[in-house]
Image (tube, rainbow, N blue to C red):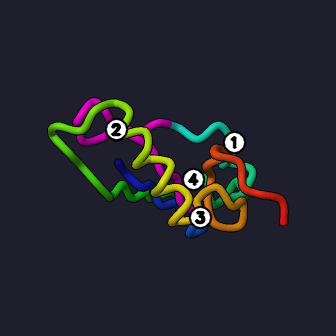
């Protein structure tokens, strides 16, 4: 499970099943809309491994992804770019 941090301090949590250094699933929202054209010219994105397992089942990994999204609130548009699982109406 990796977390990606963007310059606006928002995060995206996703599974990385490839094990490669640079892979990260992409959020389905337009991140560029949060940045000015000037800010888009020089962007640093940080990927951090939040959890890993060599023997977790696919179901266990997906459950952990949902858990991490909820714990980190990355499905809150004020905090992150995940749009699933949906947050309860407040």
Rendered location of residue 86, percent (x, y): 71, 48
Main structural element of the magenta stretch: helix, strand or loop? loop
Q: Quadrant of the C terminus?
A: bottom right
Front: mark 4 or 2:
2
Q: Mark 3–mark 4 contact, CB under 8 Å?
A: no
Q: CA distance from mark 1 to mark 4?
A: 19 Å
N-terminal of the pair, mark 4 or mark 2, is: 2
Q: CA distance from mark 4 to mark 2?
A: 27 Å
Q: Position of residue 18 (x, y in %)?
A: 27, 30
Tell which of 33 and 88 is nearer to you: 88
Would you name the residue on which mark 1 appears? 29
What whole-number distance in Å separates the C-alpha atoms at marks 1 and 2? 19 Å
The residue positioned 65% from the left and 37% from the top of the image is 28
**Sooner in the amino-acid sequence: mark 3 or mark 2:** 2
Q: What's drawn in magenta, residue-wise?
A: 10-25
**Residue ID at (36%, 54%):** 47
* SS for callout 4: loop
Is 85 located above or below residue 74 in the figure? above
Q: Which residue is mark 2?
A: 16
- Residue picked out by circle 3: 73
- Tell whether position 37 is magenta: no
State the residue in front, 1 or 66.
66
Q: Nearer the viewer, residue 72 or 5?
A: 72
In terms of image quadrants, where is residue 45? bottom left
| Residue 53: x %, y % from top left | 20, 45
Give the label, 3 or 4, closer to the camera: 3
Where disc 2 sits, the SS reads loop
Q: Which residue is mark 4?
A: 41
């Amino acid at each position: 499970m990796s977390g990606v941090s963007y310059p606006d301090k928002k995060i995206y949590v996703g599974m990385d099943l490839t094990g490669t250094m640079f892979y990260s699933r992409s959020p389905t929202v337009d991140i560029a809309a949060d940045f000015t054209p000037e800010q888009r010219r020089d962007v640093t994105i940080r990927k951090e491994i939040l959890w890993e397992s060599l023997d977790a089942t696919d179901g266990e990994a997906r459950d952990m992804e949902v858990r991490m999204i909820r714990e980190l609130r990355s499905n809150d548009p004020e905090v992150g770019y995940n749009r699933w699982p949906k947050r309860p109406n407040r």
